[in-house]
Image (cartoon, rainbow, N blue to C red):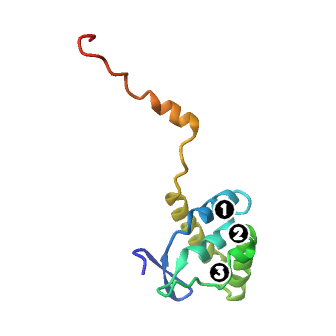
Amino acid sequence: MNPRTVTFDGAEWGLKVPATPVLIDLLLALPNNKPRVAAAALNLCLVNDKGEHPFSVSFLACSCNPLLYGGLIMEKLHEKLIPIGEWYALGLECMGEVGDTYNPPPSAAEVDAAADFTDPPVAPGDA
């Protein structure tokens, strides 16, 4: 099991951050609909010892669309009568794990700014 576990729907789940392309999809969709992305993150990040997620919904079958996927997960959560406050808080916690993991590459401006962080070397005798 993963080192960090949470209890959800009466079972223990490990928190596993999904692959980088999925991370990016989740992060880009977050401003559009937080509850759907939280639901998507919840199902994508929670995994048991068998590698299973709480709900058998394929992210790939949803064309890797976190909003569509999150909506389907929300329907499953509603069917199981899991309170919104419970799954939403856990979904946001999962998104926190996602955000902490993803470090985008530096922009060109950041690289340029870091290029001059030290003074150029001085030749012996020129000091």
Are the residues flagged by discs 2 and 1 in contact, CB closer than 8 Å? yes
Mark sitting on residue 64: 2
Q: State which quadrant residue 126 falls in.
A: top left
Spatial separation of the CA atoms under disc 1 and disc 3: 26 Å
- At label 3, the amino acid type is Pro
Quadrant in the picture for residue 38: bottom right
Apparent side of residue 86 relative to residue 101 in the rendered image (left or right)? right
Q: Which residue is mark 1?
A: 25
- Give the alpha-carbon distance from disc 2 to disc 1, as whole Å: 8 Å
Closer mark to the observer between disc 1 and disc 3: 1
Instruction: Tell me if residue 34 comes above or below residue 124 in the rendering.
Output: below
- Residue topped by disc 3: 83
Q: Amino acid at mark 1?
A: Asp
Estimate how packed mark 2 is, as few (under 14), some (14 to 19) or many (20 or more) residues with alpha carbons within 10 Å: some
Amino acid type of the residue that numbered disc 2 sits on in the rendered structure: Cys
Q: CA distance from mark 2 to mark 3?
A: 26 Å
Provide residue 2's location: percent of width, then percent of height. 43, 77
Dot 2 or dot 1: first in sequence order is 1
Q: Residues within 10 Å of mark 1 (few under 14, many from 20)?
A: some
Does any portion of residue 28 appear in the rendered image? yes
Which residue is painted at 42% across and 74% down in the image?
4
